[in-house]
Image (cartoon, grey):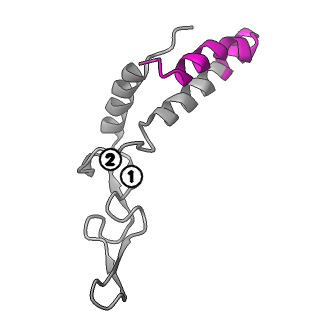
Amino acid sequence: MLIATYDQWLEAKKQILEEQNPEIDCEECGGMGEIYERCHCCGGEKEEECELCDGRGTIRYLDSAKPRPGNDLVGRRVYFQEVIADLKKWSAYTKQDFLQVAGRFVDEFRRGGVH
């Protein structure tokens, strides 16, 4: 079984996300719909509706202004989880030992390989 490198997977995943344009957590309020700030003069808390998402807590993928490191949709953790899920299916379909099938990938991934 050929396994896509992270870079190959990332390009394909971004293309799919751009085509589907799903709703994601707002990057400004973290999905809360409101922004909480502490007043610098009195220490009181100020609560405002998030302007970016209009208080919904979500925005469309293409409306995201900045790439987020460790993004829930395209991060290395998601890549690892998706490859492992595919390897589980593959090993069940081919009746091969999962640990034998996935072992090399896991080892390479831990060493920072699979670019």
Where is the C terminus found, in terms of image quarters?
top left
| Residue 46 as seen in the image, left or right of residue 82 | left
Q: Main secondary structure of the magenta part?
A: helix
Image spot of residue 13 (x, y percent): 39, 30
Binning the other alpha carbons within 10 Å of mark 2 as few (below 14), some (14 to 19) or many (20 upward) gives some
Q: CA distance from mark 2 to mark 1?
A: 6 Å
Residue identifier under label 1:
23
Residue identifier under label 2:
61
Find residue 58 and name its label: none
Ranked by sequence position, the earlier of labels 2 and 1 is 1
| Residue 18 as seen in the image, left or right of residue 101 | left
Q: As displayed, is residue 111 above or below residue 53? A: above
Please identify the quarter of the rendering in which residue 15 is found: top left
Q: Residue furthest bottom?
A: 42
Please identify the quarter of the rendering in which residue 7 is found: top left
Count of marks overlaid on the render: 2
Q: Secondary structure at mark 1?
A: strand
Q: Residue at x 43, y 36 (%)?
A: 75
Magenta segment range? Answer: 88-115
Q: Residue at x 43, y 41 (%)?
A: 73
Residue 90 lies in the magenta-colored region: yes
